[in-house]
Image (cartoon, rainbow, N blue to C red):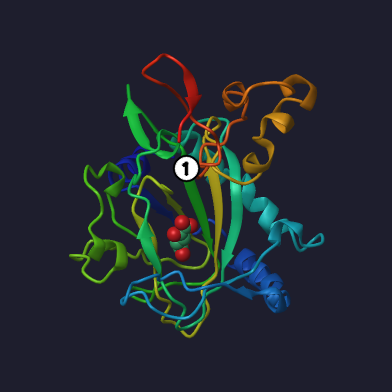
Amino acid sequence: MDARERYFWDLTGHLVVKGVLSKEEVEQTNEIVDRYSDRVKVGGSTARDSVAFAGTGRPMLPGILEFPKPDCDPFHNMLAHPAVVSRLNVMCGKGFRLDHGPMFIVSNKGTAGHTMHGNGEPHRPHVAYHHQNGITYVGGVTVAWQLHDCKEGMGGFACVPASHKANFPMPLGVKTGDGDMDLIYQPVVEAGDVVFFMDSAQSHGATPWKLDTTRRSILFKYAGRTSSRGGPSQTVAPPEIYWDKNIVEGMTPEQLAVMFGPYSNHRGEIPMLEVTKDGTVKIEE
Ligand SMILES: O=C(O)CCC(=O)C(=O)O
C-alpha cells in the first residue's frame, strides 16, 4: 500500500484497487461461477423500510471455498492474495484474519439495495477506526472482489465517504437513501477490481441493481487479530467450550461471565457484570 492509497483510505474509508485480476482470470472465474448457478439462493430484501432501495430479494451463491478442486482455487487464491496482504497489513495490522464470509452477491436487475449501516453506531471499539503515532487501525475490513463491471448509478456497493470519522448518528434519510443529501457514493468498478471498505466503522450498503448483467461481488470479511466479530467465535465462546467443562464446573454465573472466549460482536448473549450499590458483583439485567 503506497502513500497515495493510504491517504485515500484514511480520508474516505474505502479504496478501489484496479485490475487485480487479469482478463483471463476473470473469465476463468466467471466460467466456474456459471457452472454453479443452480446453487444460488435468493434471500429477503435488504431494503427494509427504504423506498429508494426497494426491490427483490438478494441472490447469493454460497460455499465457494468448498467447491471441489480445482473450482475452489480462484477463491482460495483471493484469501491471501498479495494485493490483499499488502493492504490489510496496513489497514488492520499484521496478523489479520478472515472473520466471516465470503459472501458472494449475485444480484439481478431489480434486486433491492441494502440500507446504509455501520457509521460506528453503536460505537464498538473492536471495529472502530482510530489512529495514533502515524498508524491507522480499523478492526473490520471487507474486501470485495468484482467479477462484473458496475457502471455509474447502476447499483452495488455504496458508502458515505469519510463517515468512519462521523461524530453524529446517520440521519434516517441517509440510512434509507430516501433523502441522502447526495452523500451516498457508489464507486464505479470493473471486473478484476477489488474494493476495500471499513465494515462497521463506515456507513455503507448497496444501491439497487439496475444492469441487465448480474452483479458479481465476493465479500471477504477480515478482522484485526484481536477482533472476534462473528463466524466460529460465536460457537467457541461459551466457557465450557473455550476452557473445559471440568474447569468451569461449579462456578457461579458471575464467575462464568469472565470465562467466555473472545466474541466481540455478540448481541447480548454474553453476560455482562456490574457492581451494585452494596458492593456485590452481579450479572447486568
Ligand atoms: O452489497 C454490498 O456490497 C454491501 C454489503 C454490506 O453492506 C455488508 O457487507 O455489510
Q: Residue furthest bottom?
A: 212
- Please name whichever residue, 156 or 25, is drawn nearer the observer in this view of the structure: 156
Q: Residue furthest front?
A: 278
- Please name whichever residue, 121 or 87, is drawn nearer the observer in this view of the structure: 121
Residue drawn at x 73%, y 76% is: 35
Asked if residue 71 lies left or right of residue 226, the reply is: right
Number of callouts = 1
Task: Find numbered disc 1 in the image and state the secondary structure of the residue it sits on.
Answer: strand
Q: Residues within 10 Å of mark 1 (few under 14, many from 20)?
A: many
- The part of the image, by quadrant, that contains residue 91 is top left
User: Disc 1 residue type?
Assistant: Gly
Q: Is residue 209 above or below residue 82?
A: below
Q: Please give the residue where the numbered disc 1 appears in the rendered image.
A: 140
Q: Residue furthest top?
A: 279
- Please name whichever residue, 58 or 72, is drawn nearer the observer in this view of the structure: 58
Q: Residue furthest left?
A: 181
- The part of the image, by quadrant, that contains residue 138 is top left
Asked if residue 33 lies left or right of residue 230, the reply is: right
Q: Position of residue 32 (x, y in %)?
A: 71, 71
Question: Dividing the image into 4 quarters, which one contains the N terminus?
Answer: top left
Q: Position of residue 243 (x, y in %)?
A: 72, 25
- The part of the image, by quadrant, that contains residue 219 is bottom right
Q: Is residue 117 above or below residue 279?
A: below
Mark 1 Cβ and ligand 1 under 8 Å apart: no
Residue drawn at x 45%, y 36% is: 285
Q: Position of residue 130 (x, y in %)?
A: 34, 32
Q: Position of residue 251 (x, y in %)?
A: 67, 21
